[in-house]
Amino acid sequence: MKSAVSSSLFFHSKNLLKPNPLSRLESVFLPKPSPRSIVKLPSSSTSGLRSISSSSSSSMASSFKPEQARVPSALPLPAPPLTKFNIGLCQLSVTADKSRNISHAKKAIEEAASKGAKLVLLPEIWNSPYSNDSFPVYAEEIDAGGDASPSTAMLSEVSKRLKITIIGGSIPERVGDRLYNTCCVFGSDGELKAKHRKIHLFDIDIPGKITFMESKTLTAGETPTVVDTDVGRIGIGICYDIRFQELAMIYAARGAHLLCYPGAFNMTTGPLHWELLQRARATDNQLYVATCSPARDSGAGYTAWGHSTLIGPFGEVLATTEHEEAIIIAEIDYSILEQRRASLPLNKQRRGDLYQLVDVQRLNSK
């Protein structure tokens, strides 16, 4: 291995069909002033003009009602427990041997921690082959714990022993007669902090390329997941969840510093969309995005693209890898979030008079 609560989401749009008065304006060309016609104003006058301009800009922003673009209003970005830390992305090979997969993941987590990682992210479906036939066989009863869920028992033990936070990729979860694609978050005390069940199931059909229907075996989750940890407030999505910008926007409005997406994009959509979607989610919401994929196995029934990556709040690729097994160690610096948001103050420029994103779960909990 080399280092390298039920909810639904919707937009509410209004006044979109009103005519734009600016569309009726025509260009006006003024003659270039001669030097003699230029009047210099005293500094006191120019400061007054600046004040008027600032006041006008503030008034215009107020009329746009940016605070109403998120319903309920967006939460302020909370002060994180620490400003800088290292994240470890463990891009793992996955086999049909479940015990081997668990011990292999354990060693990778230990290696990442030994290299300074305070947060470790695992891939989607790291304890099982990625197939509808395998999900029922490898599924675990997470809430029961112990022998009923050896994968999460390992994550709990390691996170406590190493005093790190683990975003445990995802594993098939069994609850009664239902199966979920589930991500477990363990704190540095070994306790289960959150559980995210994949909200958007991977049902696609690209003729001649790939067809996969998760809904044949899996049930969709119903709850967006934001969790406060020792390394900040984190929003969780799994693979196909990253395609839905509304979910990421809601996480940002809930004050997330970082979004983590364990995922297993394929050889058709991976080259086109994997990095693109990560950078879009980070840029639109001005926060960090981390992803972790299984390593590529060309002989498997489902072939993962790989390329686990950390993206910064300006959409920049901070660290990535190719398709082989790898452990990526990279630094996250939350102080950059405020810098980026000050340079591009999107939250103050949204048009709440024209559109709204409604967080149904938060709205109904009031």
Image (cartoon, rainbow, N blue to C red):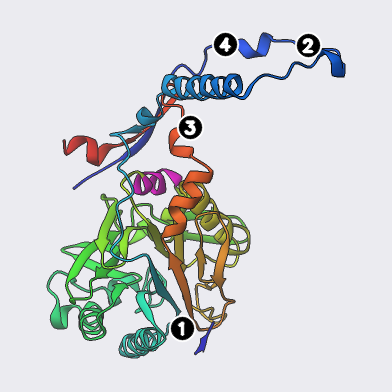
Task: Name the residue nearer the viewer: 123 or 28.
Answer: 28
Apparent side of residue 153 relative to residue 347 in the rendered image (left or right):
left
- Determine the secondary structure under disc 2: loop
Three-letter amino acid code of the residue under disc 4: Pro
> Which image quarter holds the C terminus?
top left
Local crowd at mark 4 within 10 Å, few (<14), some, or many (≥20)?
Answer: few
Mark whose residue sits in front, 4 or 1: 4
Which badge, 3 or 2, comes first in the chain's sequence? 2
In this orientation, does residue 263 appear?
A: no
**Residue tagged by mark 4?**
19
**Residue tagged by mark 1?**
93
Q: Which mark is residue 349?
A: 3
Type of secondary structure dominating the magenta stretch: helix
Which range is magenta?
Answer: 245-252
Q: CA distance from mark 2 to mark 4?
A: 22 Å
Q: Residue 313 at x, y = what percent?
A: 50, 55
Mark whose residue sits in front, 2 or 1: 2
In this orientation, does residue 308 appear?
A: yes
**Residue tagged by mark 2?**
28
| The magenta stretch spans residue 231 | no
Q: CA distance from mark 3 to mark 4?
A: 21 Å
- Determine the secondary structure under disc 3: loop
Q: CA distance from mark 4 to mark 1?
A: 56 Å
| The magenta stretch spans residue 250 | yes
